[in-house]
Image (cartoon, coloured by chain):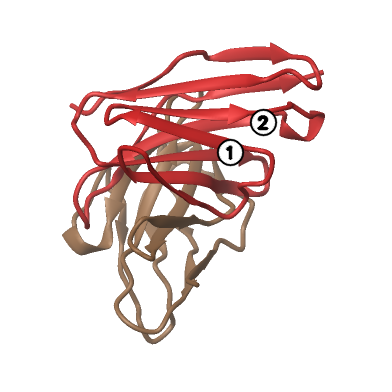
Chain colours: A brown, B red
Amino acid sequence: AQRVTQPEKLLSVFKGAPVELKCNYSYSGSPELFWYVQYSRQRLQLLLRHISRESIKGFTADLNKGETSFHLKKPFAQEEDSAMYYCASPYNFNKFYFGSGTKLNVKP
Amino acid sequence: DVKVTQSSRYLVKRTGEKVFLECVQDMDHENMFWYRQDPGLGLRLIYFSYDVKMKEKGDIPEGYSVSREKKERFSLILESASTNQTSMYLCASRGPRGETQYFGPGTRLLVL
């Protein structure tokens, strides 16, 4: 089964600094990868997916098959980016596997 | 916009009680899911359903059962609640392959 790992439980950066949230997957083939975000007291929601190759709220993520990674990046962090971030990938079509999550704290 | 609702935001139950958590989605999605969310463990899949009356076990089904009698509604049942089932429970629904999951607001369950 595909597994997704997020090695950092907590990431603290200052406002305006670059941020990178790491995600690694274990899968041979063409994975389907997502980043979800959960702001304080809000529901979990999609941030971006690799298949659409889009930038949402200044965040991007590139699938690196050589390193089996899908790291989430933003060049200049904002305080409103403080949230819990989850990397996720479906296996067996419907069984999504979520990483353990990284809490991003952007300090003023 | 897809809307996924859960019947309760907070629940307090006693050990041994039978607990029902209800989830409703309004987008005619075939696929629905129940997760529990615990700090440091992320989201873990309990059960999912890909059609009415169809269900499959996720990664942690022990102590839980589910019911899907109508397409829009997916219920999670704790037959005999235990303290280790204290958690945040998230429901989600998903459309066709490649689409994201849409999550409900969650039910925080405390079992005393």
Front-most of B65 and B43?
B65
Identify the residue at image location x=65%, y=49%.
B41
> Between disc 1 and disc 2, whose residue precedes?
1
The answer to whether A52 appears left or right of B112 in the picture is: left
Q: What chain does mark 2 sit on?
A: B
Residue B39 image point, x, y percent: 67, 41
| Residue type, label 1 | Arg
Q: What element carries label 1?
A: strand
Callout 2: 10 Å neighbours few (<14), some, many (20+)? some
Above-or-below relation of B33 to B21: below
Cβ atoms at labels 1 and 2 below 8 Å apart? yes
Report how far apart the C-alphas of labels 1 and 2 lie in the structure. Answer: 6 Å
**Residue B78 placed where, x, y %?**
64, 29
Is residue A74 at all visible to an observer of this figure?
A: no
Residue A69 placement (x, y as % from top left): 43, 73
Can residue B33 be seen here?
Answer: yes
Tell me which chain the residue with mark 1 is part of. Answer: B
Residue B109 figure quarter: top right
Residue identifier under label 1: B36
**Residue at (78, 35) in percent of width and height:** B84
The residue lying toward the viewer, choosing from A43 and B16, is: B16
Placement of B87 over or under A18, stated as above or below: above
- Residue B54: name its quadrant: top left
Q: What residue type is labelled 2?
A: Ser
Circle number at residue B87: 2
- Mark 2 lies on a secondary structure that is strand
